[in-house]
Image (cartoon, grey):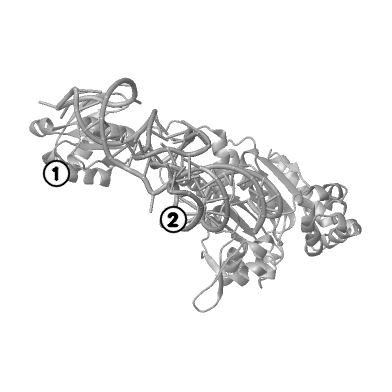
Amino acid sequence: MASKITAPRGTQDLIPPQSARWQDVEARIRELAHRFGYGEIRTPLFESTDLFVRGVGETTDIVEKEMYTFPDKSERSMTLRPEWTAPVVRAALEHNLFAQGPLRVYYVGPIFRYERPQRGRYRQSHQFGVECFGYAGPEADFEVISLAWELVRSYGIDDAVLNVNSIGDDACRPLFRESLLAHFRPHAAQLSPESQRRLERNPLRVLDSKDERDLALVATAPTIASVLCEDCRAHFSAVTGFLEAAGIPFVLNPQIVRGLDYYTRTVFEITSGALGAQSTVCGGGRYDGLVRSLGGPDVPAVGFALGIERLLMMLDALAREGERPRSGIQAVALGARARATLVPIVAELRRTLAIPTFVDFDERKLLAHLKTADRNGARYALILGDDELTAKTMVLRDLAERSDRSIPLGTGKDVAASLVEMGV
RNA sequence: GUGAUUGUAGCUCAGUUGGUUAGAGCGCCUGACUGUGACUCAGGAGGCCGGGGGUUCGAGUCCCCUCAGUCACCCCA
């Protein structure tokens, strides 16, 4: 087994029938994004390391320890995409998309983070996300949040919770930072080592510490709400107002800080109890400063990223694995002559019918073929043996109804036509 | 990166204080039933016991290392 090559740690193969669920989810995502008027963007799997360092923030965990970074053959430092937002902004700038007014895009695809795998956390995972550029107003925040919520709602996931918060902007966040420093610094020695480190680099992140040594001080820390500037306050209350008007339930959660540096004002998360320690299925917010910090114009933006693995985990927790309806035809040939006759017929069925045609080329008994049909979830078995060859017919067995019908044996087109006529 | 725990057939798992040729259930294949699927019965195939090293007369069982899974911390999707 040691000599056997296995999938790298924290990655997984997606194989049938599991892959069909992913196709369903992705189809729903695309349909939803389409309805909201978002166009798809695809960017390279790897980018210049610098893009993420500048875009995500040097003090974030992603940049400090989670990036898959490697030198290419020209010794340029490259990094496997650990998140989509920075590449999306880079691409929009590169193609000058911001010159044409507001931009709405969505993405679906893998991200890579060098982490120790556990429930809901992998080295390669997949995200669906949207980015809405060009609107500074709360309407855009609402649009993006409601899009994320709509996906969760459409699956009937009832234990999902929408948490929202505002972390202020350039005007008031520095004040919040100062008041946090003033609160924690005198007691810095009592904080956990990790929090002490964060206190200097990014004091906001001390707030989401779960270390027992920090809890007491965190609990008495000043809240952002107390220092929010008038603009931020108005913006945030407009966002929550839209949510209320739309009947989208939410929780005001001052603990939500977000781990990426580029967020401003509105931040939100959708969480679920079905996900173990990684309770966030979707996280996002506003990042008005990012485009500029990546060398672009002053373009406000708001977006989110949603973990597809985690969404599927939530669906699993609902455990409503409905019986999949039978679909398709198992073409069955008994004997070499029947098999030779069947091959072109199968080819024609596959060309004209929308449902799958299954076929087993091995010489097996009818019983074995029917078992295979059962396993394939086929609705019908189309049987051709010596009797049928003589009578110039085929037997169409309805595996759900357990009934047989006879159809004339002809060319592939003839057979396909008969099947269509019979409502197959 | 830290800690805990697990790795035996395709899957779920047994394997006594180390002791000959490693087991079960499910699944798969074949047959009972020249040609009608979810039941039954009987056979069969399929394992360098994750990998490497060590202790021992002898290791699936003990020790070390390594890889991987799981769970948690950290952090996030």
Along the viewing direction, whichever of A59 and A421 lies nearer the viewer = A59
Is residue A315 among what the camera can see? yes
Rate crowding at label 2 as few (under 14), some (14 to 19) or many (20 or more) other CA atoms within 10 Å. few
Tag 2, which secondary structure? loop
| Identity of the residue furthest to the bottom in this view | A74
Rendered residue at 66%/70% (across/down):
A294
The disc at residue A340 is 1
Which amino acid type is shown beneath numbered disc 1?
Ala
Circles 1, 2 touching at the beta carbon (< 8 Å): no
Query: Residue A187: x percent and y percent?
Result: 89, 56
Which amino acid type is shown beneath numbered disc 2?
Ala
Along the viewing direction, whichever of A257 and A226 lies nearer the viewer = A257
| Identity of the residue furthest to the left in this view | A390
Identify residue for label 2: A2
Mark 1 or 2, nearer chain start: 2
> Tag 1, which chain?
A
Tag 1, which secondary structure? helix
**Is residue A66 depicted above or below A369 in this figure?**
below
Query: Residue A108: x percent and y percent?
Result: 53, 54
Query: Residue A375: x percent and y percent?
Result: 33, 35
Rendered residue at 51%/74% (across/down):
A72
Left or right position of A290 against A126: right
The C terminus of chain A: image quadrant: top left
